Amino acid sequence: MAITLRSAREIELIRSAGAIVADVLSKLQKMAKPGVTTAQLDAVALDMTAQAGAQALFKGVRNPQTRTAFPGAICASINEQVVHGIPSNDAVLKAGDILSLDFGVRLNGYCGDAAVTFGIGDISPQRRRLMDVTRQVLELAIADCAPSVKWSTVAGKMQQYAEAAGFSVVKDFVGHGIGTEMHEEPRVPNFVSSELLANDFVLERGMVLAVEPMINAGGEEVRTLKNGWTVVTRDSSCSAHFEHTIVIIDEGCEVLTVK
């Protein structure tokens, strides 16, 4: 596995891309109210990306199985949708929904990628707790990332925290290295498996990772809808998704997808 360690110059370029991602996600959270469609959010994301001189990472990405292109700049996943929700005029937000927005850009050849889940209007305590725990799983990982730490140690703590709260970790999708491409080595799972233990890696200064726990209120199993993209929980329980692009530094790690 060839993991690229980034120079100070490259990290600053990724940070610039990450700042655009953070700015767009912040704007969309303020816009997302009952009656707004995910297509409207997507249009704003596209416009802000263009104004910033960047390119939307997800738009036009080919599905490995169907070869169909993803039509949106954002992935907008509502309630039981885990990831890769397609923005649509038919997807009208309602009070009580939870919405996961995943968004990335490329700027001057370098990528940033982040995701956030939030409530629309008043949401149930159960959905609030799912979001809080998923956010805390990401925060726990960020706090533990540092040079010389094995990723399996971090992933084990993430999984243990989510499962102790009564939730399940999605195992079909994992985080990833990121830099000049959206998906680079290594694979960055949010759980421990025999595959991870066989391909474990030690965090090093200059390593840039997109860490993105996806946590389900019910079981871990997921399925893909007929559109070939949108992934939903098999038991129709809600799912939450948080992600940041981080870089390993001498003191620990730093989040690059912030304003």
Image (spheres, grey):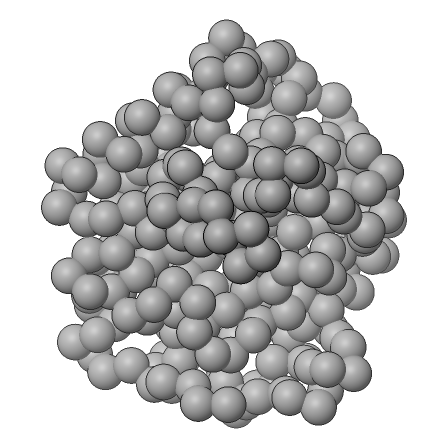
Q: Position of residue 108 (x, y in %)?
A: 15, 61
Question: Which residue is rendered at x = 57% and y = 30% of the image?
Answer: 99
Q: Is residue 5 above or below residue 141?
A: below
Q: Is residue 116 above or below residue 6?
A: above
Question: Which residue is rendered at x = 61% and y = 80% of the image?
Answer: 151
Q: Position of residue 59 (x, y in %)?
A: 36, 44
The number of callouts visible is: 0
225 vs 3, nearest the viewer? 225
Question: Which residue is rendered at x = 54% and y = 89% of the image?
Answer: 202
Left or right of residue 188: residue 207: left
Q: Residue furthest top?
A: 35
Quarter residue 28 falls in = top left
Left or right of residue 72: residue 239: right
Residue 140 seen? no
Q: Position of residue 78 (x, y in %)?
A: 61, 29
Residue 13 seen? yes
Left or right of residue 176: residue 41: left
255 vs 182, nearest the viewer? 182
Q: Is residue 20 above or below residue 163?
A: above
Q: Position of residue 30 (x, y in %)?
A: 39, 23
Question: Which residue is rendered at x = 81% and y = 52% of the image?
Answer: 220
Quarter residue 96 falls in = top right
Left or right of residue 129: residue 106: left
